């Protein structure tokens, strides 16, 4: 009975070595796209249709069988179509009202269950810039508010992968956390009715050890030729 057991152990070691030979030193590109739509239509007040899209691109390399490091680039656009009820008439307004870009560094640690499936988790550091324009009603006046924000954050993420072929993986995020972030915001208020304006600068920080799970998102990973 001992010989079959030893043979099985040797086969498992050989399989693990094969996976390591396929991954260590390999470079990859990863990416994902998201689209979101929402709408509200209350009676006799502002009806709103929101839409947004985001894209994420990653460049990384497996430094060992179980560790990958790399960089992330991200961007998003958001828009809004608004129908306001003013003085007995509906006034439409639409267009892009927010956008953002970001760059980050990630470290991922893997557990391979077999040659097809595995999980990973690890920390990341991100720097982002965001712009948002809002039209707010404030005491019978209209405030055209513009917000410029810059943030530095420390995050943790986890996911699962499925190997489709030698070059392609399917990635699925499982959860994330942002335990620490610090940011700076500049806010410009322009009151149209009273023809006045104001400015404000804000510093903020956040400590939040909570983990958001599940948070499912799908993406693809492509391995470059050696």
Image (tube, rainbow, N blue to C red):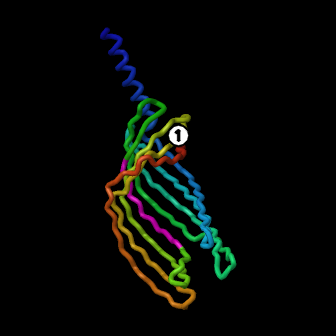
Classify 10 Å Cα crowding around label 1: few (below 14), some (14-19), many (20 and above).
many
Who is closer to the viewer here, 146 or 142? Answer: 142
- Residue at 48 percent across and 81 percent down: it is 188
What is the x, y in percent for residue 107? 38, 49
Across and down, in percent, residue 112 comes to 41, 34
Task: Answer above or below: position of 89 versus 151.
Answer: below
Q: Is residue 122 above or below residue 101?
A: above
Left or right of residue 60: residue 210 = left
Q: Quadrant of residue 208?
A: bottom left
**Residue 61 visible in the current orientation:** no
| Quadrant in the rendering for residue 78 | bottom right
Q: Residue at x 59, y 55 (%)?
A: 35
**Main structural element of the magenta stretch: helix, strand or loop?**
strand
Q: Residue 132 at what x, y percent from top left?
A: 52, 72
Which residue is most to the bottom? 195
Please report the residue visible at 55 percent of the width from the left and 82 percent of the height from the top. 142
Residue 167 belongs to the span the image colors magenta: no
Q: Residue at x 33, y 10 (%)?
A: 3
Q: Which stretch is magenta?
A: 122-132
Q: Which element is circle 1 on? A: strand
- Residue 207: x, y in percent? 31, 61
Q: Nearer the viewer, residue 7 or 184?
A: 184
- Between 2 and 171, the residue placed more toward the observer is 171
Identify residue for label 1: 169
């Amino acid at each position: 009975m001992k010989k079959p057991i030893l043979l099985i152990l040797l086969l498992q070691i050989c399989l693990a070595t094969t996976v390591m030979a396929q991954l260590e030193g390999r470079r990859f590109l990863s990416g994902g796209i998201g689209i979101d739509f929402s709408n509200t239509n209350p009676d006799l007040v502002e009806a709103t249709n929101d839409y947004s899209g985001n894209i994420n691109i990653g460049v990384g390399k497996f430094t060992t069988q179980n560790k990958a490091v790399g960089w992330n680039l991200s961007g998003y656009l958001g828009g809004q179509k608004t129908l306001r009820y003013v003085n007995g008439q509906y006034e439409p307004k639409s267009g892009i009202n927010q956008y953002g870009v970001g760059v980050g560094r990630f470290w991922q640690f893997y557990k391979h269950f077999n040659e097809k499936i595995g999980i990973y988790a690890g920390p990341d550091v991100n720097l982002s810039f965001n712009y948002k324009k809002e039209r707010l009603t404030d005491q019978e006046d209209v405030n055209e508010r513009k917000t410029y924000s810059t943030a530095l954050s420390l995050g943790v993420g986890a996911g699962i992968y499925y190997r489709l072929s030698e070059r392609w993986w399917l990635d699925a995020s499982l959860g994330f956390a942002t335990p620490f972030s610090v940011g700076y915001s500049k806010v410009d208020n322009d009151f149209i009715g009273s023809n006045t304006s104001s400015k404000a600068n804000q510093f903020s920080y956040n400590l939040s050890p909570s983990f958001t799970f599940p948070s499912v998102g799908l993406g693809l990973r492509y391995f470059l030729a050696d």
